[in-house]
Every structure is written in structure tokens, then in C-alpha cells.
Image (spheres, grey):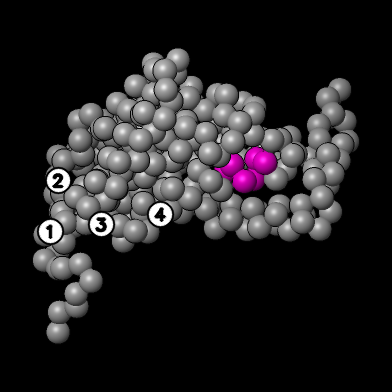
């Protein structure tokens, strides 16, 4: 479970980057940070729904539909080249858009819409206390205050991630690596809270490092990156041990 959560968290930012690049937008633009931060917020909130309600919330247009759309986009690019996304659509009310602009707008709209729906669901359940399926572990992190604290954490992380990614030219840039590893660490904390009931950290290390990375942009950018990656791998070990203790299991061992 830990590998799945943290692995998905790492890959989520990469997927957004690939799609933005494939449709011809390229990396150095305002769309990339918007897409990366959007998918991070939506991914985090969707798992917050599980924490606060005990159930996963799915919409008619959700992650599986998004993955199918991504596969179609990749196939079209492979068969027809990026020119397929430069096709001009019929003029509407004096405006003419190209296909890639519509695709990007739909992606941003989907992230924003689903994030709002997740947030409304979390807040309404937290305020009423009427969970459809009571979680196995009670925790202050499942309270209304806990919900707003977690939302504040991901909002702060996304804000400084957006500022850091504003001038990204490649996925090997320090800001990009720092962002995807930081988000993976936040998701790991959410997993621990869901499984064990341990409190979600008041101030997450990933947010602090993002702020440091933003404020220290004039210095060596690889310093906060190295700190973020090191914290991530140390945290992986801590998370594994915490989950094993809570579940009464051992890593790579099966009880008979």
C-alpha cells in the first residue's frame, strides 16, 4: 500500500508534464505548474475523502476517464504528430481556439471541479459527523479542524510549488524534482493517518522545504532538492515501520 501511494504520488506530476509536452505546449509556460499542482491537490483531496468518510468517492468523469483520455492523446500524437493538436476549431463568439488549448482547459477545469466536490464532501461530513462507513481508527485528524488543517497543508504546498515551477525548463530541474518528492511525502503522511490514526503533522517538512526552496532561489537550488529527496527516503523507512507496527506485520515476511 505504501509503495502504491507514494509511487502514484511521484508519477502523478510526471503524467501531467508528459501530457502538457505532448500536446505541443512545451515545458516553459504557465500551464505546466497549473497542471502539476492541480493533479496534486485533486489526488490529495480524493484520499482525504477516504480518511473522513470511510469511502472512496467517484464521479462520472474521474481518474479512469482521465487516463483513457491521456492514452488517446498519446496515440494521436504518435500517429499524426503534434500538428494534430494545432487544428483550429470553429470560431465561437469572435474567438478561435486550437485543439490543444481546449484539451488543456478541460484538464484544468476537471481538476478544479473535482477538487471542489471533494472539499464540499469532506467539510459536510466533518461538520455533520454522519460518516457513511465509520473508519476503523478514530483520530483527531478526522475532525473538522483536522480537515481544514490538511487542506491548508496541501494548499500551501501547491502554492509554493506553483511559484517554484514558474520557470521550469525540464523535468530534471531542481524545482520539479523537489516538488514531486515533496508531494509523495505528504501522501505518505495521509496514508499513515488513515491506517493508524496517528495525527497528521501540524507543519509538514515538505511545505517547509518548498518555502525554503522558493526563498533561496538565488542560491544553489540543489540544496533544498537534496534535502527533500533525503527526507523522502528516510520517511519511507519511518512509514514502513509505523505501518508494520500498527498492523502487526513484518516487511517481506508472511505469517503462516
Q: Which residues are magenta?
A: 16-21
Residue that carries the numbered disc 1 in the rendered image: 246
Res. 120 visible in picture: no
The percent coordinates of residue 126 (x first, y second) are 25, 39
The mark nearer the N terminus, 3 or 2, is 3
The percent coordinates of residue 88 (x first, y second) are 87, 36
Image quadrant containing the N terminus: bottom left
Q: Distance between the Cα atoms at labels 4 and 2?
A: 22 Å
Residue 158: image quadrant is top left
The percent coordinates of residue 43 (x first, y second) are 43, 45
Residue that carries the numbered disc 3 in the rendered image: 133
The mark nearer the N terminus, 2 or 1, is 2
The disc at residue 198 is 2
Badge 3 marks a residue whose secondary structure is: loop
Q: Distance between the Cα atoms at labels 1 and 4?
A: 21 Å
Q: Distance between the Cα atoms at labels 4 and 3?
A: 27 Å
The disc at residue 7 is 4
What residue is at 64 percent from the left and 34 percent from the top?
A: 27
What residue is at 56 percent from the left and 48 percent from the top?
A: 15
Question: From the viewer's perspective, is the residue at label 4 or at label 3 nearer?
Answer: 4
Note whether 236 is above or below 116 in the view shown. below
Amino acid at each position: 500500500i505504501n509503495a502504491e501511494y507514494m509511487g502514484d504520488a511521484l508519477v502523478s506530476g510526471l503524467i501531467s508534464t508528459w501530457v502538457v509536452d505532448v500536446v505541443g505546449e512545451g515545458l516553459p509556460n504557465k500551464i505546466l505548474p497549473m497542471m502539476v499542482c492541480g493533479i496534486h491537490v485533486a489526488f490529495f483531496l480524493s484520499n482525504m475523502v477516504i480518511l473522513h468518510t470511510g469511502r472512496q468517492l467517484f464521479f462520472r468523469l474521474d481518474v479512469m476517464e482521465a487516463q483513457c483520455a491521456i492514452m488517446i492523446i498519446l496515440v494521436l500524437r504518435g500517429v499524426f504528430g503534434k500538428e494534430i493538436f494545432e487544428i483550429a476549431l470553429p470560431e465561437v463568439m469572435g474567438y478561435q481556439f486550437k485543439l490543444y488549448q481546449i484539451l488543456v482547459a478541460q484538464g484544468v477545469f476537471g481538476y478544479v471541479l473535482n477538487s471542489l466536490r471533494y472539499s464540499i464532501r469532506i467539510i459536510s461530513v466533518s461538520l455533520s459527523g454522519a460518516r457513511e462507513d465509520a473508519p476503523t481508527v478514530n483520530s483527531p485528524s478526522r475532525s473538522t479542524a483536522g480537515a481544514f488543517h490538511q487542506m491548508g497543508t496541501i494548499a500551501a504546498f501547491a502554492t509554493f510549488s506553483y511559484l517554484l515551477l514558474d520557470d521550469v525548463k525540464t523535468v530534471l530541474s531542481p524545482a520539479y524534482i523537489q516538488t514531486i518528492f515533496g508531494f509523495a511525502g505528504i501522501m505518505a503522511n495521509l496514508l499513515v493517518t488513515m491506517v493508524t490514526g496517528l495525527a497528521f503533522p501540524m507543519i509538514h517538512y515538505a511545505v517547509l522545504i518548498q518555502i525554503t526552496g522558493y526563498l533561496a532561489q538565488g542560491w544553489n537550488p540543489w540544496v533544498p532538492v537534496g534535502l527533500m529527496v533525503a527526507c523522502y527516503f528516510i520517511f519511507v523507512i519511518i512509514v514502513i515501520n509505523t505501518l508494520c507496527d500498527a498492523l502487526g506485520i513484518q516487511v517481506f515476511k508472511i505469517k503462516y
